[in-house]
Amino acid sequence: MRYAIFLILLSAVLHVALWALSGFASDSRFLLVGAVIHCLLALALITQIWGSRWIAFMIMLATSAVALGSFVAPPLEPYWIFGLIFIVHMIAAVLLFGAIWAGRPKTNAA
């Protein structure tokens, strides 16, 4: 779980770096919102708020789709960092899925 938290915080740093690489463009301010959301997700996972694993998993999947979709439109930002964000989000989603799977209730099916 701590690796997933680390990757989510890394994603927040990448969002801020992407905003800086875009020259602090006003069109890219949504990246700061993404960074704040990722920090709040990491905080929810650290404090183990009920359901935070599922919420973080779904948000990682959704934001990885957004990062992948950013290759279609001509952005102000460099393409390579979108690929890096996509990779970080997918690895975090896999780690979160593993944490969700490990925490499921055990059944004694015969």
Image: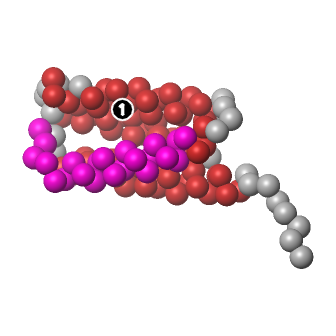
Residue name at image x 71 percent, y 56 percent: 102
Residue 40 among those drawn in magenta: no
Q: How is the image coloured?
A: secondary structure
Taking the spot 29% from the left edge, 48% from the top edge, the residue there is 67
| Identity of the residue furthest to the front in this view | 110
Residue 15 lies, with reference to residue 101, above or below; the image says above
Q: Residue at x 55, y 41 (%)?
A: 55
Main secondary-structure element of the magenta-colored stretch = helix
Q: Residue 80 in the image: x percent, y percent?
A: 21, 51
At x 10%, y 46%, the residue is 74
User: Left of 15 or right of it: where is 94?
Assistant: right
User: What x and y, as percent, mark residue 97?
Assistant: 58, 55
In this rendering, does residue 84 appear at all?
Answer: no
Q: The C terminus appears in which quarter of the rendering?
A: bottom right
| Residue 63 sits inside the magenta stretch | yes
Indicate the quadrant where residue 44 lies.
top right
Task: Residue under label 1, please give it.
Answer: 34
Residue 40 at what x, y percent from top left?
A: 50, 28
Image location (x, y in percent) of residue 8: 47, 40
Magenta segment boundaries in residue numbering:
55-76
Q: Amino acid at mark 1?
A: Gly
| Element type where label 1 sits in the image | helix
Q: Is residue 29 above or below residue 105?
A: above
Q: Is residue 19 above or below residue 86?
A: above
Residue 21: image quadrant is: top left
| Few, some or many residues within 10 Å of mark 1 (<14, 14–19, 20+) | some
Residue 107 visible to the viewer: yes
Q: How many marks?
A: 1
